[in-house]
Image (cartoon, rainbow, N blue to C red):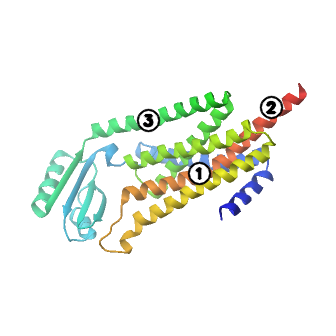
């Protein structure tokens, strides 16, 4: 299966010129930007913020009642998410007034046992937003400097930054379409996407710029290794997503693990985007760069 995918991808790359290869990933990038822009205009943030970033209240209670009954009971409150974990129900509420929050806590404590309440204020949420942005910026700067030190030229550094940026933007746009909130877990997934992107791009750059042979032969060699690495990771992530999302179908004692499910699906979509960006967009740019320098040397 991996060999067949790689052969089809290699054939596609060989039979299309650089502009044609770059057109598809650039179109996806523009569509993703439009989705993020629409979300930003609607909500004030490019992605839907989770409780960790906008503040709120998480309440866990020991109960045998169904999730539907809780949704009806607390319909008057800003209930953002509710899930059942074993014998407990976990509810996440958005920001609310002090009076409403006091009323909610009193209602839960007086009606249920084994109540656990965690509150995150908006100030702490804003602090986490800044830390997340700083982490992403530092990641981009660090990887650009590292690639420049390895290859001593700007084009590979630009390729790596463009690929990682496109992977994250496409993954974030998918989060908006799928209704996945930005949480500490999904931020970690986005940062991991940067790592996967850099890995595949450095592999491509090393094979093309530092190995003997024709440019297309080196691209093909890198493609077989890189696609195998990515598809292996994708297979593991798909299993992780299925288990964390649908394990409750196998046994009533199991429940959905929302955090792992969200991390897995964001990584899956990010890696699919990385396959497109690395082996179409970055390959076209790198092939153009090598052929351009080669023609200059021949003229000299």
CB atoms of marks 3 and 1 within 8 Å: no
Instruction: Compare residues 245 and 93 and report the one nearer the observer.
Output: 245
Residue that numbered label 2 is attached to: 293
Q: Would you say residue 129 is visible in this rendering?
A: yes
Residue drawn at 73 percent across, 43 percent down? 284
Q: Indicate the position of residue 159 as horizontal and vertical percent values.
A: 65, 37
Q: Residues within 10 Å of mark 3 (few under 14, many from 20)?
A: few
Comparing 110 with 249, the one in front is 249
Relative to 211, 38 lies left or right: left
| Residue identifier under label 1 | 273
Image quarter of the N terminus = bottom right
Q: CA distance from mark 1 to mark 2?
A: 29 Å
Q: Position of residue 222 (x, y in %)?
A: 69, 48
Left or right placement of residue 269 versus residue 84 in this view: right
107 left or right, relative to 232? left
Q: Tell me: 244 left or right of 118.
A: right
C-alpha gap between disc 3 and disc 1? 21 Å
Tag 2 and tag 3, C-beta contact below 8 Å:
no
- 23 to 136, vertically: above or below: below
The reply to whether dot 1 and dot 2 touch (C-beta < 8 Å) is no
Q: Residue at x 71, y 44 (%)?
A: 283
- Quadrant containing the C terminus is top right
Q: Mark 2 or mark 1, which is nearer the start of the sequence? A: 1
Farthest-out residue, left: 110
What label does residue 135 carry, if any?
Answer: 3
Residue drawn at x 90%, y 28% is: 299
Identify the element where label 1 is drawn. helix
Task: Please say whether residue 166 is visible from this viewpoint.
Answer: no
Above or below: residue 284 compared with residue 174: above
Q: Position of residue 140 (x, y in %)?
A: 53, 34
Answer with mark 3 or mark 1, whichever residue precedes in sequence.
3
């Amino acid at each position: 299966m991996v060999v067949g995918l790689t052969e089809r991808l290699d054939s596609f790359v060989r039979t299309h010129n650089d502009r044609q290869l770059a057109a598809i990933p650039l179109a996806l990038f523009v569509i993703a930007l439009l989705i993020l822009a629409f979300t930003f205009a609607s909500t004030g943030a490019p992605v839907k913020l989770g409780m960790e970033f906008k503040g709120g209240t998480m309440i866990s209670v020991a109960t045998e009642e169904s999730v539907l009954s809780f949704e009806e009971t607390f319909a008057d409150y800003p209930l953002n998410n509710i899930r059942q974990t074993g014998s407990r129900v976990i509810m996440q509420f958005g920001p609310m007034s002090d009076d409403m929050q006091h009323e909610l806590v009193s209602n839960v404590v007086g009606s249920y046992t084994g109540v656990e309440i965690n509150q995150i204020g908006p100030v702490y949420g804003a602090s986490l937003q800044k830390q997340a942005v700083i982490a992403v910026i530092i990641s981009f700067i660090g990887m650009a400097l590292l690639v420049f030190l390895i290859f001593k030229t700007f084009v590979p550094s630009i390729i790596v930054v463009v690929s990682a940026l496109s992977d994250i933007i496409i993954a974030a746009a998918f989060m908006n379409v799928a209704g996945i909130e930005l949480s500490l877990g999904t931020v970690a997934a986005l940062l991991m996407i940067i790592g996967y992107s850099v890995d595949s791009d450095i592999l491509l750059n090393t094979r093309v710029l530092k190995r003997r042979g024709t440019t297309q032969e080196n691209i093909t060699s890198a493609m077989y290794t890189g696609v195998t690495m990515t598809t292996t990771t994708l297979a593991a992530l798909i299993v992780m997503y299925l288990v964390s999302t649908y394990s409750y179908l196998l046994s009533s004692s199991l429940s959905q693990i929302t955090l792992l499910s969200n991390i897995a699906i964001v990584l899956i979509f990010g890696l699919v985007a990385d396959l497109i960006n690395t082996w179409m967009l970055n390959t076209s740019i790198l092939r153009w760069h090598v052929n351009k320098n080669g023609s200059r040397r021949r003229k000299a």
